Image (cartoon, rainbow, N blue to C red):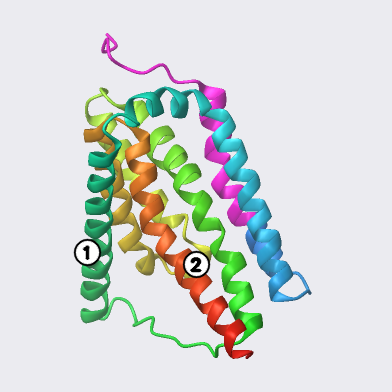
């Protein structure tokens, strides 16, 4: 007999949401093969991500609206919790990468590109996706793939594992299909699922994820400004 607190799941909305990331990956891979400049490729990929962002927001605007009314109360405490969540996120990434590299399972990812306006512009445009990812990814991976399946016993924790693994695999294009390199993001995905499970509010996830990702955008913006100032 179903648990009285189980959430009603809309199959059409769920399936539609789950198609967003695979389509983004497939279209992104196709765009990468186009015979055009890197800036155009990145711009097209960003537009594809924007479309997925809009669809995800549209599908679950009711969840976002309802939980925002609760989240906005005592927002400062929740901001502090989000900052703490970001610190834990970076600790998980750093720890997982250290273990993988020290055991030889993954190679060091240290790289240095020459600073130029062209490279900086590509980096800045590409980093725009991190401003949208906290919304679309938390809706898809944490709500659709995990939280809406809560109170279903062992199946809830099966979805916990599945959502975490798929979150890591969603970074497929970032790591050229290297699954080992995606393991740290699987662990971060598990951490975010726990945040949602205990906070019971998707906005706690969105804020934590946004603060985590916005550092990348600010870094890309800084590089762009430096490239402009130095005229390289």
Q: Which residue is mark 1?
A: 91
Tell whether 74 sits left or right of 215: left
For residue 139, which quarter of the picture?
top left
Q: Secondary structure at mark 1?
A: helix
Query: Horizontal and vertical percent for residue 216?
Result: 44, 66
Query: Horizontal and vertical percent for residue 137?
Result: 46, 45
For residue 13, which quarter of the picture?
top right
Q: Is residue 177 visible?
A: no
Query: Horizontal and vertical percent for residue 217?
Result: 48, 64
Q: Nearer the viewer, residue 21 or 121?
A: 121
Q: Secondary structure at mark 2?
A: helix
Q: Is residue 220 visible?
A: yes
- Segment colored magenta: 1-26
* Quadrant where the C terminus is found in the figure: bottom right
Tell whether 10 sits left or right of 189: right
Query: Horizontal and vertical percent for residue 156?
Result: 28, 31
Q: Which mark is residue 231?
A: none
Most common SS among magenta residues = helix
Task: Give the residue drawn at x 58%, y 85%.
Answer: 229
Of labels 1 and 2, earlier in sequence is: 1
Q: Callout 2: few (<14), some (14-19), or many (20+) C-alpha neighbours within 10 Å? A: few
Q: Which mark is residue 174?
A: 2
Q: Nearer the viewer, residue 36 or 14?
A: 36
Task: Give the residue drawn at x 59%, y 78%.
Answer: 120
* Quadrant where the N terminus is found in the figure: top left
């Amino acid at each position: 007999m179903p648990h009285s607190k189980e959430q009603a799941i809309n199959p059409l909305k769920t399936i539609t949401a789950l198609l967003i990331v695979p389509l983004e990956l497939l279209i992104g891979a196709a765009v990468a093969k186009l015979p055009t400049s890197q800036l155009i490729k990145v711009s097209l990929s960003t537009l594809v991500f924007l479309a997925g962002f809009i669809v995800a927001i549209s599908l679950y605007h009711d969840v976002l609206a309802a939980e925002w009314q609760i989240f906005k109360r005592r927002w400062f405490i929740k901001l502090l919790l989000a900052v703490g969540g970001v610190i834990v996120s970076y600790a998980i990434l750093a720890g997982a990468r250290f273990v993988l590299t020290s055991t030889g399972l993954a190679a060091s990812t240290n790289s240095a590109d020459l600073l130029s306006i062209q490279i900086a512009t590509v980096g800045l445009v590409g980093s725009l996706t991190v401003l949208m990812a906290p919304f679309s990814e938390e809706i898809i991976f944490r709500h659709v793939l995990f939280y809406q399946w809560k109170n279903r016993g062992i199946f809830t924790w099966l979805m916990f594992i599945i959502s975490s693994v798929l979150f890591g695999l969603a970074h497929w294009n970032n790591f050229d299909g290297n699954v080992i390199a995606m393991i740290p993001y699987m662990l971060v995905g598990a951490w975010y699922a726990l945040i949602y499970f205990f906070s019971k509010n998707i906005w706690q996830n969105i804020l934590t994820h946004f603060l985590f990702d916005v550092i990348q955008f600010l870094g890309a913006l800084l590089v762009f400004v430096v490239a402009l100032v130095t005229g390289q």
